[in-house]
Amino acid sequence: MKVVVVGGGISGLASAHWLADAGGDVTLLESNDQLGGLGTFFESGGKWIDRFYHCIMPSDDHLLRLIDEVGLTDQLYWKPTRMGFIDGGVKYPFNTAIDLLRFRPLTLPQRVRFGVTSLLLRRLGKGKDLDNTNSEIWLTHLYGQSVWNKVWAPLFRSKFGPVEEVPALYLWQRLGRERNNSTRGYLRCGHKGLIDAIEGSIRSNGGDIRTEAEVTAIRQQAQSMQVELADGEVIDCDWVISTVPLPLLRKLTSNSPLGGTFRDPNLPYQGVVNVLFFLSRPLDGYYWAPVLNSGTDFDGVVEMSTLVEPSQYGNRHLVYVMKYTDRASALFQESDEVIAKRWCEQFLALNKDLGLTREEIVEIRVFRAPFVEPSYPLGYSQLKPEIRSGDSRLLLATTTQVYPNITSWNSSSRLAGEVIRLLQSSKLPEGVAGVSD
């Protein structure tokens, strides 16, 4: 039985890894020259650098299992991190009860209510139909209108854009993943090391991997599938696993009856514009800080070198700043040079309290990705695509299916495992091992 996996992000890599490990005949196709999706990388200062920031949480069981299977557990380390909060250009620590009591954007009664409600939020959501509950309504009821306006509303807008309804279940599930845990993990070999290890595992088990292999069409025959490439090659196979965003899959199946076989909720996606600042000095020690009302285009700062040793960045300190935005927005369409210049000025102004100078910014890189975060409507649990629809031989493993879990490498690894278990449960040859939960 031959399986073609379309897309070489973490979902595609994990799917191909488990298929090849179980003895399946698998071919992985990736249109770019690198594997990894949002885990792609570039070389700077003799080091491989992630284009987009990543970390590993202690609760990321599925990703941790994958890391172990490809022999990288000894590369994994854990480190406590701190969170900040920037409002009106003023920086606040945001980690302890004392920090919250000193958080001046809220009044003292609002701070107390915020703290107590946050501690009880997981319990308050149990047994509730949060999938059909508007986050704004639920959080306003719990925290009050002022806290929603000052804190939650700007955070939601920065993540989802002008979306009026986001299910409260998504937030509740996210808090479940993080569980007030400040400890985060990373790999000494970086995410490139993980991607390379998965690639090596696939190849060593007989799998075929092709980069710069653009798929232009997916078709189903009577009892088989066809995948057509941009160079005209047609690959015949028994099953196709698609991990590409649904807007792209829609195009690939537009001239085939397959286009009507999978549930397509037609979700809007948020893309991201991501700027990396390499510094000759540390910033302020906060791993992550949202940025509100501070005159910046970007609304989040991640000081990655609070988690990753500067030696992994060529003895430089790395800071990511980002803005989630629609891929059709004016910002997303701007040139790298224009964004780099403006955001550098904003970054320096934001950190004038530290005396940061332009000379201490030794390198700036700009990256963007068009499909990062689906924006979910109320009741999405009943709308999200199934892995397999009807008797189709097309299986889906996309970010639109990880809900209510957050979009992460762990969620994608979990979904890939579900896809492979479904495929193996009745379709692989007798005697071929399965993927355990």
Image: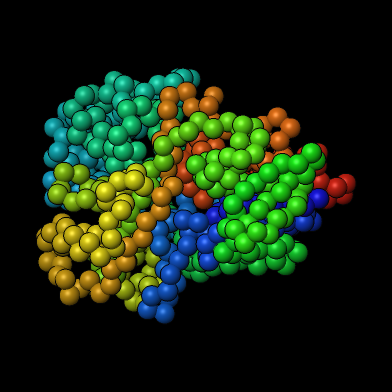
The quadrant in which residue 348 appears is bottom left
Residue at 15% x, 67% y is 356
Q: Is residue 8 visible?
A: yes
Q: Look at 61% across and 31% down and name the residue there.
A: 260
Closer to us: 201 or 374: 374
Quarter-of-image position of residue 81: bottom left
Q: Is residue 178 visible?
A: no
> Which quadrant would residue 17 be assigned to in this image?
bottom right
Percent across and percent down for residue 212 are 57, 64
- The answer to whether 128 is drawn above or below residue 342 in the figure is above
Query: Between residues 430 and 93, which one lies in front from this camera angle?
Result: 430
140 vs 76, left or right, is: left
Percent coordinates x, y for residue 198 in the rendering? 62, 62
In which quadrant will I find the C terminus? Answer: top right
Of 425 and 79, nearer the camera is: 425
Where residue 411 sits in the image (x, y, percent)? 53, 44
Q: Is residue 277 left or right of residue 104?
A: right
What residue is at 40 percent from the left and 53 percent from the top? 369
Give residue 9's position: percent from left, percent from top: 54, 55
Of residues 46 and 303, which is closer to you in this image? 46
Q: Is residue 44 left or right of residue 421?
A: left
